[in-house]
Image (tube, coloured by chain):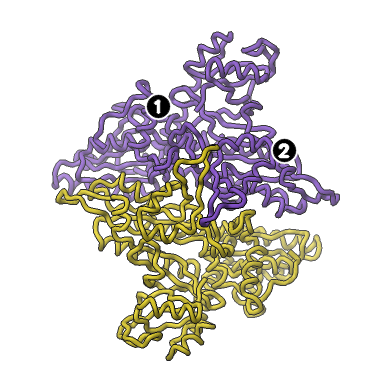
Chain colours: A yellow, B purple
Amino acid sequence: MAEEKLPTRSENYSEWYNQLIQRAEMADYAPVRGCMVVRPYGWALWENMQQNLDKRFKETGHVNAAFPLLIPKSFLEKEKEHVEGFAPELAIVTIGGGQELEEPLVIRPTSETVIGYMYSKWIKSYRDLPVLINQWANVVRWEMRTRLFLRTLEFYWQEGHTAHATQKEAEEETLRMLDVYADFAEKEAAVPVIRGRKSATERFAGAKETYSIEAMMGDTRALQAGTSHFLGQNFAKAFDIQYLDLNNQLQHVWTTSWGLSTRFVGAIIMAHGDDQGLVLPPRLAPYQVVLIPIYKNDEERSKVMPVVEKLKAELSGFRLKVDDRSEVTPGFKFNDWELRGVPLRIEVGPKDVEKGTFAMARRDIPGRDGKSFVPQVNAARTVGDMLDQIQTGIFQKAVDFRKAHVFDPKSYDELKEVLQGGWAYSWWCGDAACEAKVKEDTKATTRNIPLDQEGGSGKCIVCGKPASEKVYFARAY
Amino acid sequence: MAEEKLPTRSENYSEWYNQLIQRAEMADYAPVRGCMVVRPYGWALWENMQQNLDKRFKETGHVNAAFPLLIPKSFLEKEKEHVEGFAPELAIVTIGGGQELEEPLVIRPTSETVIGYMYSKWIKSYRDLPVLINQWANVVRWEMRTRLFLRTLEFYWQEGHTAHATQKEAEEETLRMLDVYADFAEKEAAVPVIRGRKSATERFAGAKETYSIEAMMGDTRALQAGTSHFLGQNFAKAFDIQYLDLNNQLQHVWTTSWGLSTRFVGAIIMAHGDDQGLVLPPRLAPYQVVLIPIYKNDEERSKVMPVVEKLKAELSGFRLKVDDRSEVTPGFKFNDWELRGVPLRIEVGPKDVEKGTFAMARRDIPGRDGKSFVPQVNAARTVGDMLDQIQTGIFQKAVDFRKAHVFDPKSYDELKEVLQGGWAYSWWCGDAACEAKVKEDTKATTRNIPLDQEGGSGKCIVCGKPASEKVYFARAY
């Protein structure tokens, strides 16, 4: 761990990201190209995210289930747009038990098809609706250019799949889950997001509408952090999911799907990380507090450790790590836990013992400004308040950063310019040709058409034709 | 759901099992042969099992991580016995992203190889040991004869993989995790198990020793409900996992692995289920209590519902389902929840409202004997005590059942006879030929050589040669 320093973000953002993940032991490269191993520290973060999201899904009436990994290849072909979108990315099993398979199986890239097939078996009457199921699963998409967490051949996610009696209910569900994602992102991960509708070009293959939450990373690039799809009756028709309505008439159901993946771990890393390493949000961090005893000899140690033990007991309501390694120095430990982004560091030295205090160092405010000395009494309350402040602080910092890097260009030339170092929020006529021109000229894509916008109308930033909605353009991960 | 009656266990145990799982909506058949869909009710049971086991793993110092689904085929070939065991069962990916792969990838049937590869990267010094990692994952084994939960192409499990500096530590870990499984099985699932060592024939491919917990099902067949393997240095040598010891010498680590899968759901179904359906252990049941309001008209309903709401609030510490469906009769609901194995049913009717009582019906004791009328005051305590009694009751019933069906045959002929309707606990010389003869003659295999046995010596039940250990023979799932 005493390697050379982490590259700074301004030196090389991409190297900063890759090295940070490995040095902080969040993830590592698997032997198969593009696959990752999520190491215990990274998985602990994901588990906290899972628990938090799962609670929100259950509160909104959803239950979990598990659908199979392997899907007959022919299933994907039943929905025309779906197969066009996913066919190039499939991993295909052709041999099982030593025999060539009669029909090749694909490893699920997403589960609309196999879940559609099961729903057609389960759903008979309006009494069976709505069906509100989620699954936590691994999926495989054969991506060419991969990055740890952001884009890996295999990734982990949850995918919700719901079926409803009416279009209205399905549309409401789509937006409800978008809001669940947005709330999770902002309250738990402290990552501010824009909720909006994707353009037709950027839609999920087979969806009528796709909604996303979009976050700004530390290099100003955008990251799509979660999506919610209104699938209309596309999959209901492809898989013949029908129910008898109150009038005893057969009707196709209306479906939705929505997903959030380990990619979001990348969002947390890039939204908050600094040149010293990770900065993890207290509400999700594997360790919220690291407690480091400071002593030079056995005598000091014997004074310090009882206070450490007392604090450990008092802070048992927090995810606390006591780092009492004897083979490394306190300075080494400070750097190590800074790299790993633990929100709050507590130090207890001989002077603290005498004074009845301890030192607290905020990860989000490096140096003196983030350090304070507080009484040992009421430690749990002091620490709890500080963690809340950190949570709020990093959220606000991300909001401010985004605000400073979203622009309202006045001309197409200005659009091209601002997209080099930020997002543009501009009128757009909705024409895919304008979208394509921007992509061609700047590599930026439309991120989404935000749900919350001022209304009115203007002129498309690209072609000058009348436009009734504004869109975010940005280069994206 | 108003279909014909479930077959009884004595009529057709296998059909009873298959139909019960589908009717209780625990699982369903997936479109791919041998794969299953675990439905929300079944998955809720598995989630409770997961949480419970995960807590035990963390208490014994383990952390979770996630290793990849896809493994280079060549990895499996690095450990000779391992590949021999698993090669016939592999699902192989030969195409990715539209291209034939240079090296085929296998879908993990178990993860010793890829985890061994990663451990060789991560482990450098004795300070890095022990490594105590678990993962919750799906695996695929191309089985020919499949049964829901018991043997499916894809199944869900946890697999622990640990690396240690010494043989002794690894052996201790192997037995520690066996004990964790046994404790979980008996305390949480109420399934009594025999902890023991597998014969060489029945060992995990690549292990030095395999230990198992074995449970007796309702038809007296045995089910291996969890295994813990001491892998010696086999995988350490195959994957070159070495560490520098205190004397700065390179040493191979010693490894273990241990797993428990969704097969255990099958064990719960078959250990406790009766002709009316599932009987789920209170500590794991998705719903511990179902509360059914009883009324004939709106007037009665308006009397009953306030008491139902009051009880619901008082019983909020339990996993409680209020079944207030209006389209079906109470009798229908009783059968439905009996089928689904909810441990305790509460009924509240107009007479109960007058008397300040409610009715409790134990799932494990059908009919009048299991029914009692109790005061509404102290409902939480009454219900809690009753759930404890049910938990203990079904465990004891399973213990008694096993006791009644384990035999100590005096001759080989008697062995063959008793194995038609139970287990034999007999001296065995340890020779694989004797084991093979029993299998040939009776279809029974050695289950395990129990850790807890009386000692002494005897004569092998098969060949009559001296034997120093006793073994369980049984037909098994």
Q: Label 2's element?
A: strand
* B391 to B130, vertically: above or below: above
- Label 1 sits on what residue type? Ser
Q: Which mark is residue B40?
A: none
Can residue A66 be seen here? The reply is: no
* Residue at x-position 56% and y-position 37%: B181
Please state the horizontal and vertical placement of residue B385, each as a whole percent of the image.
41, 37
Q: Which mark is residue B232?
A: 2
Q: Chain of mark 1?
A: B
* Residue at (45% x, 80% y) in the render: A438
**x%, y% of residue A38?**
59, 56
- The reply to whether dot 2 and dot 1 touch (C-beta < 8 Å) is no
Q: Are marks 2 and 1 on the same chain?
A: yes
| Residue that appears at 58% across and 8% down | B411
| Viewer-closest of A218 and B278 | A218
Q: CA distance from mark 2 to mark 1?
A: 39 Å
Tell me the residue at 54%/9% (across/down).
Answer: B414
> Which residue does the numbered mark 1 point to in the structure image?
B14
